[in-house]
Amino acid sequence: MITVLLVDDQAVVRAGFQVLLAEAGDIEVVGEASTGPAAVAAARRLRPDVVCMDVRMPGGDGIAATREIVADPAGHPPAILVVTTFNLDDYVFGALEAGASGFILKDCDPEELIGAIRKLAAGHGLVDQSVTRRVIAEFARRRRAPDPAAGAAQLLTARESEIVRLLAQGMSNAEIARELFVETSTVKSHLGRVMSKLGTRDRVQTVIWAYQHGLAFPGRS
């Protein structure tokens, strides 16, 4: 069972999400919060698998709360799915910078929300289809590490770098496997080692690292 914490300042929104998620069968809402600080406290108390986080709330916004939850000194923080009515770049940048694993809009279909939660619980990040890789690339470009290529070369093997570049192009594990003529399980193992080396929690944060460290470039496939 996937456990979820709902964070939104509007009770009617939380109630709506409760109903939608209850129908999924494999998702359980274990708590709710209406402010950023309350979300941080609830996340540390309840230890959910996924937090559905609103961005703009009185008494502490969702981006600040995301940053605190992800930085939990106890380790193993939940995945943060930012669910908002706003698709402006700055909100996306802020959420990604804070450590969110996914970003989806409130007007998405119920199946999309449920699918997003399942993906994050399984360790896969995602970004709403209306928020393209261009946004991730621009985010990373603004925060590119100094002398990025040198650091990347020292951290990853040639095969690991190749897989990360393909990941940054939007390929799935199966597509990467076909491209490299290897098994999907081999790609998964490589990505697991990559994330361990980089300290990234999921695919989204790994793609951001790739852009920041010169393994991927905006507009280049």
Image (cartoon, helix red, strand yellow):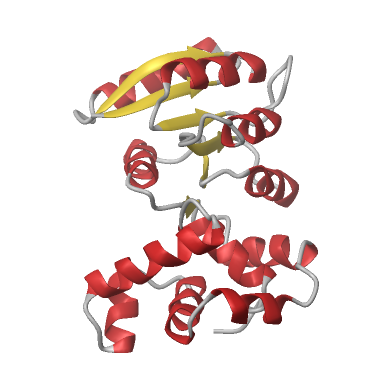
- Check the image and report above or below for 166 versus 64: below
- Check the image and report above or below for 166 versus 134: below
Q: Report the residue at 51% width, 37% height from top.
A: 80
In the image: residue 153, left or right of residue 76 = right
- In front here: 24 or 30? 30
- Check the image and report above or below for 211 versus 95: below
Q: Report the residue at 34% width, 78% height from top.
A: 176
Q: Quadrant of residue 25?
A: top left
Rendered location of residue 96, percent (x, y) = 63, 49
Total marks in image: 0
Rendered location of residue 73, percent (x, y) = 58, 31
In the image: residue 117, left or right of residue 60 = left
- In front here: 127 or 15? 127
Q: Report the residue at 35% width, 36% height from top.
A: 110
Q: Report the residue at 50% width, 35% height from top.
A: 75
Q: Quadrant of residue 121?
A: top left
Q: Quadrant of residue 63?
A: top right
- In front here: 197 or 214? 197
Farthest residue, direction top: 11
Rendered location of residue 170, percent (x, y) = 46, 70
Rendered location of residue 219, percent (x, y) = 64, 80
In the image: residue 52, left or right of residue 184 = right
Q: Quadrant of the C terminus?
A: bottom right
In the image: residue 54, left or right of residue 26 = right
Q: Quadrant of the N terminus?
A: top left
